[in-house]
Amino acid sequence: MRFCHLWSLALLPLTEAFVLPSKTAPAFSISALRESSTSSSSSSENDTPIQDLENILSDPIMSARSARIVAPLMSLLALEAGVGGSPANAAPAPYPYAFDASLSRYFPGSLPNSDIAQRIASTLRKRDYRPYNTLVGSSLCSDEINDTPQSLATDIQKKLVDIKDGGVFNLGGLGGMPFVGTSGFGAFLSHCPNSGKIF
């Protein structure tokens, strides 16, 4: 059985500890980190440390100690191997206008956010909602898709409120239901202008 102390990992270069086969570095083996020897027959003495890690991770039962030790080692191994996700590796869209085609097929007659924001702003202006007297609260999910320049809250902010005075007050929430509670509504209402309007 091969054995490795964690302090000996610091003494070995990463390439020796994680890339070279264990027969050239017999002092290192992650399979020795396993507390139980239930699958010790499945790993041979000629396995590389990478194969040892794969053997450990393929076993559905892993001790907590092994998980605490193997997880950081796997991240170090991924860093050394240069493996990692990046937007450059994402698959391209099947064709450039796939979203627009799906939108027109499954939601015919739907309007873009800019049209909806324009209709809301024109209706509210008729009711004397102006940038100087209006406080807008948004309880949309604060996910990144709702914070883009094309989102409905941003369009309403541009067309209805004075952006330099703060714009839209985020109330948090999902699906339009605000999650701020009593203190959050108090903070929201404290920003309302005198004899102002709330939307």
Image (cartoon, rainbow, N blue to C red):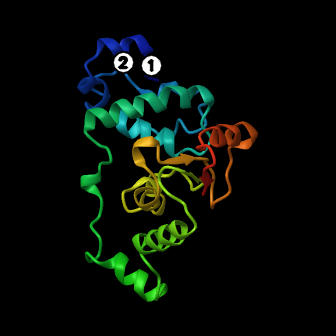
Which residue is painted at 34% across and 13% down in the image?
Answer: 10
Which residue position holds label 1? Answer: 3
Which residue position holds label 2? Answer: 27
Local SS, label 1: loop
Give the label on residue 160, or none. none
Question: Given the current orientation, which residue lies at the most extreme right position?
Answer: 182
Cβ atoms at labels 2 and 1 below 8 Å apart: yes
Horizontal and vertical percent position of residue 36: 61, 30
Which residue is painted at 26% across and 55% down in the image?
Answer: 89
Q: Is residue 79 visible?
A: yes
162 is higher (above) or lower (below) than 93: above
Q: CA distance from mark 2 to mark 1?
A: 6 Å
Q: Nearer the viewer, residue 142 or 117?
A: 117
Horizontal and vertical percent position of residue 42: 49, 42
Horizontal and vertical percent position of residue 47: 36, 37
Horizontal and vertical percent position of residue 165: 45, 42
37 sits left or right of 91 in the view: right
77 sits left or right of 30 in the view: left
Tag 1: amino acid: Phe
Q: Nearer the viewer, residue 18 or 87?
A: 87
Tag 2: amino acid: Ala
Q: Nearer the viewer, residue 70 or 139?
A: 139
Picture quadrant of residue 150:
bottom left
Q: Nearer the viewer, residue 6 or 167?
A: 167
79 sits left or right of 72 in the view: left
Which residue is painted at 43% across and 37% down in the image?
Answer: 53
